[in-house]
Structures are given as structure tokens and as C-alpha cells.
Image: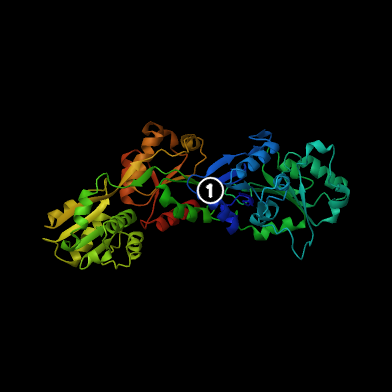
């Protein structure tokens, strides 16, 4: 048994340490706080027990004494327990109290430090907390002291002017008191101040002022936030890298399958967007493998295999391998792939793509194949989704080819957990909804309700990966604002970036 007190960092999931992430993946029990990103919980192993013990303002799921007992009880069952805390466990995180409780009971524990908000949030706001030209001293304070102490333990008379930079945690509610103490004990009224809410996340908001006007500027601001006091705040004018990214402050919905959404979401997040994953489809196996298996066993009789998606490639080869065969079964068979992503998926299996049309639609595939050779009497295999368009096989048959369609995978409608998306759309909280296939459009409309689409006019922009997806959207009553010029995920990201710039 062992308890790991793990700091998850300030909010950006990418800021957790390698050791911290390893602990999460090995844990039998994860006990996590309010400010911990739920992205980390996706890394938990199957069967891990996950317990939320967050404290939000005056609302506590469990009191601290109860959390201490819970840690001990779970560890004493012989399991590996991760206590996942925001920031660093030992910086105003009560990790020290939890460690003492465990030590007194002889329960082994380790501390895995995390990046603390007082360093990270200012860095993401373009404020170095120390700088040789401004200050070499830094003080970390809490703006939310233990209410049972009967008075402040912070020596305001000493630290107000002793430290070049002061970083105050959890100080929004007590900001008038903090500002008053600093002014009373000698800090000049024109001292620069920055208040950073939800630092390092896509919701980050930074308000800059002075001790003289920051209270007026932050009226109505809700926690959590870090306050930075000192001349280093002036450097934000030159170093503000995070909030100047092209998609900063924008919220984008990604509707593609969850297991495919991560790369797309990551590209958008790197450009500053807040991404809501709202998968409307799920990729599953065919109900009956018999047709696919039959064609896989006689691959050598085909002249061409046409892959129209990455899913088609992966499901095709996965089944081929399950049948005890390998890529040698494609000896002599030419391969056509629609789009660079599909072609790259083929190359992962160490195979060369013989035909890749310049435009990533079925119509262009047909033209490219016709330019290459006579298609009469050619056998062409098309492993695809169960709901794929019929255009290509029908046109191939008109040219005298034997086009064999087989279902390599199915796309199912799924109902995401983000059930309040419609309310966010109505309220104008969403900037863009992205569609990467016709099935994502159809399922989105079914989940949201076609009768609700009219309410979204002018409130949200819909973006499509290509003309086929656009056509489906328009048939269902969705006005597409942007269509990618290159019908790929990178092309869609580029279109979104340019659309927001305009």
C-alpha cells in the first residue's frame, strides 16, 4: 500500500510532471480536487476507483478530516492511492496536513511536486515573477488564511515593501483587505497589479491595473485567481504570448469520434481555443464479419483496393491480421487512398500508395483511376463504413468494373455527456461547431433537434471539412459558414484560423 500526494499543476493538463502522470496510470484509487483537470482521469487504468472530494468556495464535498480518513482507509486495503491536487501539494494545498496524518499512522507515502499557480499563471499572462532588471525577490502569500487562527499571520508591515514581487493565492474575496494592507504599510499606490483568473487554461482572463484602481477594475470577478503585485507586471506589454494566439478566447465544438478527436482538439488548443469534445459518432466493428472475411481471403483476385478513410484502413488491416494473414496478401494489388491522412495510414503498414487524387472526394478518385487505366473487367475492393455514399461503386460499375463494397466498420450515434450543449449554443457561448463527416452532421442534428436549429442563427458558426459534408449540412437546414479548401483536419484547422482572423 502507498499514497502518492500528486500535484497536477495549475490547470493546463500539459503541465503535469511525467512522474505525476505515471502515478495516475498506476493508481487503484484516485481522490481528486475541484481545480484538477478531468483530462487526467482519462488516464486512469480500467477499474480504478475515482472519488471527487472538491472544495468550491464554502461548498465542501468532504471536510479535510474526512479526506484524511478516506486516504488512510483506502491505503489500508492494500491499494495504491493517488491524492490528486491542483498546483503543488505543499504550497497552500493542505498536502502537508494529509502527509502528517498518514505518517502518524505508519502509512507509506510519496510527494510528487507540481507546478504551482503563482509561477505558472503569471508566466502564461506574460509576467515573469522575477527579472534581473526589476526584482530578485518573490513572496508567496495566501489570501485565504485559516479562519480559526483569530487574526492574520501575515506580517504585512514587513513584507509589503520587502519583496519585489508578491503573488497572492485565493485572494479575490479578500482583495480589498490585501490592497488596503499593502497601501497602509508603504507600497506605492501606482504599483502595477495583475489579477489572473483560471490561469494557464483556455478560460484565462488577465486584468491589469495598480494598487490604486485594481479593486474597481476587478468588480464582479469570481475566483479562482492569482494576484501578482510588482513592477514585473509591466513586462506583460512585451511578453503576452498566451492571450495573443489566434483562437484565444474562442470556444470550438469538435463532433468527431472521441478516439479520433484528440489530435484535432490539440491543434485547436495550441492556437488558443477552448475545445469542447462532443462526439456524435462512435466507430464499431461490423455486425457480421462474413462479407469482409470472404473478400480478405481472396485479396489476390482484386486489381485495386480503394480506401476512403483512416478508419477503413485500420479496420481492414486489423481484421486481416486477426485472420492470420499480413500485408503480403496484397501482393500485386494496387492501392488508392483518398486524402493525405488516409494515405499516411496505409504507409503505417509499410505499403506504397499507387493513387492519391489531388482532391479528396469520390468524384476525383473516379477521374484519377480512369486516367490511369482501362477499368473494364477490373475487380475493385472498397472496405468502407456501413453508411458510405454509393456514388463511387455505382460509377465504377457503369465503366464495366466489378466494384465490391464491404463493411469494414460502422458509425453509431452516441449521446455525449455534455448534455447542456444546446443551452450553451442558445446563449451564444459557443463560437464554432465543426463537422468532419456527413455522419457527424446527421447525428448532431438528431441530438440537438432539428426544430432547435433556427434558434442558433447568428449565434454560432458551423464549419465543414469538405463539400460532401457541407451538402449534408445544408440539406438538414444548417448554414455552413466555412468550408475547408483542403479536405483534411489540417485544412479544417487552417480554415478556422483564417475565419476567426477575418
Q: Which residue is mark 1?
A: 39
Count up the numbered dots: 1
Residue sitting nearer the eye, 54 or 129: 54
Residue sitting nearer the eye, 85 or 453: 85
Q: Position of residue 319 (x, y in %)?
A: 28, 55
Does residue 426 appear left or right of residue 358 in this picture?
Answer: right
Q: Position of residue 160 (x, y in %)?
A: 84, 51
Q: Is residue 398 visible?
A: yes
Quarter of the figure with residue 235: bottom right
Element under disc 1: helix
Residue sitting nearer the eye, 380 or 94: 94
Q: Is residue 193 placed above or below 222 in the rendered structure?
A: below
Q: Is residue 187 visible?
A: no
Task: Give the residue displayed 40% in from the left and 57% down from the top.
Answer: 491
Does residue 357 appear left or right of residue 227 in this picture?
Answer: left
Task: Give the residue displayed 78% in from the left and 62% down from the top.
Answer: 134
Quarter of the figure with residue 222: top right
Amino acid at each position: 500500500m502507498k499514497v502518492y500526494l500528486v500535484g497536477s499543476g495549475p490547470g493546463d493538463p500539459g503541465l503535469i510532471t511525467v512522474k505525476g502522470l505515471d502515478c495516475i496510470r498506476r493508481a487503484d484509487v484516485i481522490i481528486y480536487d475541484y481545480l484538477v483537470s478531468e483530462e487526467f482521469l482519462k488516464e486512469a487504468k480500467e477499474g480504478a476507483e475515482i472519488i471527487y472530494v472538491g472544495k468550491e468556495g464554502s461548498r465542501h464535498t468532504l471536510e479535510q478530516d474526512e479526506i484524511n480518513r478516506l486516504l488512510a482507509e483506502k491505503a489500508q486495503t492494500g491499494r495504491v492511492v493517488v491524492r490528486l491536487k491542483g498546483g503543488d501539494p505543499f504550497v497552500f494545498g493542505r498536502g502537508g496536513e494529509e502527509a502528517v496524518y498518514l505518517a502518524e499512522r505508519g502509512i507509506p507515502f510519496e510527494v510528487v511536486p507540481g507546478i504551482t499557480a503563482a509561477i505558472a499563471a503569471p508566466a502564461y499572462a506574460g509576467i515573469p515573477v522575477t527579472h534581473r532588471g526589476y526584482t530578485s525577490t518573490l513572496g508567496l502569500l495566501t489570501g485565504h488564511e485559516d479562519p480559526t487562527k483569530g487574526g492574520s499571520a501575515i506580517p504585512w508591515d514587513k513584507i509589503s515593501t520587502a519583496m519585489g514581487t508578491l503573488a497572492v493565492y485565493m485572494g479575490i474575496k479578500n482583495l480589498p483587505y490585501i490592497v488596503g494592507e499593502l497601501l497602509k504599510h508603504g507600497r506605492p499606490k501606482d504599483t502595477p497589479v495583475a489579477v489572473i483568473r483560471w490561469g494557464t487554461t483556455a478560460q484565462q482572463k488577465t486584468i491589469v491595473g495598480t494598487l490604486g484602481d485594481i479593486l474597481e477594475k476587478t468588480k464582479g470577478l469570481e475566483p479562482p485567481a492569482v494576484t501578482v503585485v510588482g513592477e514585473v507586471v509591466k513586462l506583460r506589454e512585451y511578453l503576452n504570448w498566451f492571450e495573443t494566439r489566434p483562437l484565444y478566447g474562442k470556444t470550438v465544438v469538435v463532433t468527431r469520434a472521441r478516439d479520433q478527436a484528440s489530435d484535432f482538439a490539440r491543434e485547436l488548443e495550441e492556437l488558443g481555443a477552448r475545445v469542447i469534445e462532443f462526439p456524435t459518432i462512435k466507430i464499431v466493428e461490423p455486425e457480421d464479419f462474413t462479407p469482409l472475411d470472404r473478400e480478405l481471403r481472396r485479396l489476390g483476385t482484386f486489381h485495386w483496393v480503394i480506401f476512403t478513410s483512416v478508419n477503413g484502413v485500420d479496420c481492414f488491416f486489423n481484421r486481416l491480421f486477426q485472420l492470420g494473414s499480413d500485408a503480403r496478401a496484397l501482393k500485386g494489388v494496387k492501392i488508392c487512398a483518398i486524402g493525405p491522412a488516409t494515405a499516411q495510414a496505409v504507409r503505417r503498414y509499410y505499403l506504397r500508395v499507387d493513387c492519391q487524387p489531388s482532391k479528396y472526394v469520390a468524384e476525383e478518385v473516379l477521374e484519377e483511376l480512369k486516367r490511369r487505366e482501362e477499368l473494364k473487367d477490373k475487380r475493385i475492393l472498397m472496405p468502407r463504413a456501413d453508411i458510405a455514399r454509393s456514388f463511387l461503386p455505382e460509377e465504377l460499375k457503369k465503366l464495366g468494373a466489378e466494384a465490391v463494397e464491404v463493411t469494414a466498420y460502422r458509425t453509431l450515434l452516441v449521446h455525449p455527456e455534455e448534455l447542456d450543449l444546446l443551452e450553451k449554443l442558445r446563449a451564444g457561448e459557443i463560437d464554432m461547431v465543426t463537422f468532419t463527416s456527413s455522419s457527424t452532421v446527421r447525428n448532431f442534428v438528431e441530438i440537438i433537434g432539428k426544430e432547435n436549429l433556427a434558434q442558433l442563427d447568428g449565434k454560432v458558426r458551423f464549419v465543414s471539412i469538405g463539400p460532401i459534408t457541407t451538402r449534408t449540412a445544408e440539406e438538414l437546414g444548417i448554414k455552413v459558414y466555412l468550408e475547408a479548401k483542403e479536405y483534411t483536419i489540417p485544412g479544417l484547422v487552417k480554415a478556422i484560423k483564417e475565419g476567426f482572423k477575418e
